Image: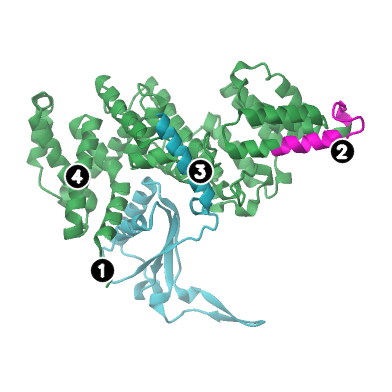
Chain colours: A cyan, B green
Amino acid sequence: MRFMVIVKANAASEAGEMPSERLLTEMGKYNEELVKAGVLLAGEGLHPSSRGTRVRFSGSKREVVDGPFSETKELVAGFWLIQVKSKEEAIEWVKRIPNPDGGDSEVEIRQVFESEDFGEAFTPELRAQEERLRAEVASRA
Amino acid sequence: MEVVTASDTHKAIDAVWRIESAKLIAGLTRITRDVGLAEDIAGDALVAALEQWPKSGVPDNPGAWLMAIGKRRAIDAMRRNPMMDRKHAELGHELESKQESPEPGLAEALDDHVGDDLLRLVFISCHPVLSTEARVALTLRLLGGLTTDEIARAFLVPESTVAQRIVRAKRTLSDAKVPFEVPRGPELAARVSSVLEVIYLIFNEGYSATSGEDWVRPGLCQDALRLGRIVAELAPNEAEVHGLVSLMEIQASRLRARVGPSGEPIVLLDQNRAKWDHVLIRRGLAALARAEALGGARGPFALQAAIAACHARARTADETDWRRIASLYEELAEVTPSPIVELNRAVALSMAFGPAAGLALVDTLTSEPTLANYHLLPSVRGDFLRKLGRFEEARIELERAASLTRNARERALLLERARACAESAAALPGGASTARTDSLAAT
């Protein structure tokens, strides 16, 4: 299963403040841990929304709106893309994200849609066949 | 606030186990010098978590919690066993003096060893004293954190068979007094190869299942990929590890494109490339660059990865650089001579220079004893013959291939192609037995 771990913006990230050295160090260690565990696929941090732009759609009209945007807590400041076995594993990894500066922030976990999820695309017939096969093997052993 | 139920906690414990079990077993093996005992103790620590965490909640540092319990049990076990006690008196003493439960200093002291211990555990699980099946089971169990039941499901064997394999493997390691160490000097290369073989075997069992009804089992591919990525970070200077990771990433990038809606296999050139996973392709190309930067471009896995990369870089099947692929196979045949590599080279040659070029090479392989029952030989040969318009000969080869494959879905595909050849043969002037000339087939 693949999850996107979304880091929400806060006042500091929106002000374009660089993270403290301590946070950078601990975040580096954390990222290393993700790599060593073989779960990290990708990850990036984003510039503050003052450097961002939105394009609003209304029928055939397109309106370009420059940042910054006001709803800080709903903005995305960065993300990780991880490959794990379960949502619980994703949660367990997210709980380990360092927060040394003690501030309040929120991280959101969203499963990446995989339309060809073979595990679930099994037809009931195939499942039945697999069960039969396993039973056969078991009886021969 | 959501209410945390006992079953939520169990799922959380499963997740912690997935993340921590290999480190835990590795650390405990360093203490006990006995991987079997270490795994038993790790299991005890898990049981303790299952008893306590639903009541107390998951601790802030679950890994350290499990390790503290494990270490206490390890010391108890050593006390109970006088032989062991003598052997480890010093170690046990050292441990006892630092025995306090999770405190940051200890966790960090342990962290220093974690990488080394994990690498030792990798080498012990893939030790040549073990049978291939035992290596696979032990690696998935100790490093992948899979349960016996999960391994049994993945390989379509009864759970008791896997359990026996693991018990026997642990006994073999103990009887052979296999040391818990990273091999050095000339032994290292061979031992690394053994590790990579095991991981690739797991990957391949997921990628093109040798038995059963399903063409792919993506879960096993993911397990192998994760193991490969872990080993690549544990032994970052081993070029071939990156070669293997690259190969697996690129092959896995095609997983969702290589199965049709009703589970039938779709061959590489017919795949919808929009379905390829570009995150994995990018990772695969990066890993290949890493292998090459370490001077490993001519490693067998790196060469196979380079071939896979040729396909990954082609936006359409027609854009595939078959000449480069054929020359990479030639290099691969020099490094690891094998009739299977030759068979692949024949396919590349046919794509680069026409089916006659491929057939010429394949015809030199038909007397190869190791390929006598290998379904892909008649399958490939049948394909060349079909392209050359020699439909009747093609049909015979494809039917033979169908009779040799153990995979039901592949068999169905081969029989369908054989039928199509029979129809083409019947439609030819003069009927099924007409021999075809090569010149016509080029059209």
Asked if marks 2 and 3 fall on the same chain, the answer is no
**Disc 3 designates what residue?**
A129
Q: Nearer the viewer, mark 2 or mark 3?
A: 3
Q: Write down the chain letter for disc 4.
A: B
Kindly identify the residue that appears in the image at 74 percent across and 45 percent down: B318
Question: SS class of the residue under badge 4?
Answer: helix
Toward the right, the furthest residue is B429
Amino acid on which the number 3 mark rests in the picture: Gln
Q: CA distance from mark 2 to mark 4?
A: 69 Å
- Asked which quadrant contains residue B150, the reply is top left
Q: Which of the labelled discs sits on residue B45, or is there none?
A: 4
Residue B325 percent across, percent down from the top left: 66, 35
Q: Mark 3 and mark 4 in contact (Cβ < 8 Å)?
A: no
Instruction: Tell me: residue B297, above or below residue B21.
Output: above
Residue B277 percent across, percent down from the top left: 56, 52
Amino acid on which the number 2 mark rests in the picture: Thr
Kindly identify the residue that appears in the image at 67 percent across and 20 percent down: B365
Q: Nearer the viewer, mark 2 or mark 1?
A: 1
**Disc 1 designates what residue?**
B3
Q: Mark 3 and mark 1 in contact (Cβ < 8 Å)?
A: no
In this rendered view, identify the residue nearer to me: A74 or B173: B173
Q: Mark 1 and mark 2 in contact (Cβ < 8 Å)?
A: no
Q: CA distance from mark 2 to mark 3?
A: 43 Å
Q: CA distance from mark 4 to mark 1?
A: 26 Å
Q: Nearer the viewer, mark 4 or mark 1?
A: 1
Asked if marks 4 and 3 fall on the same chain, the answer is no
Quarter of the N terminus of chain B within the rendering: bottom left
- Asked which quadrant contains residue B177, the reply is top left
**Disc 2 designates what residue?**
B443
Q: Which residues are magenta?
A: B416-439
- Asked which quadrant contains residue B411, the reply is top right
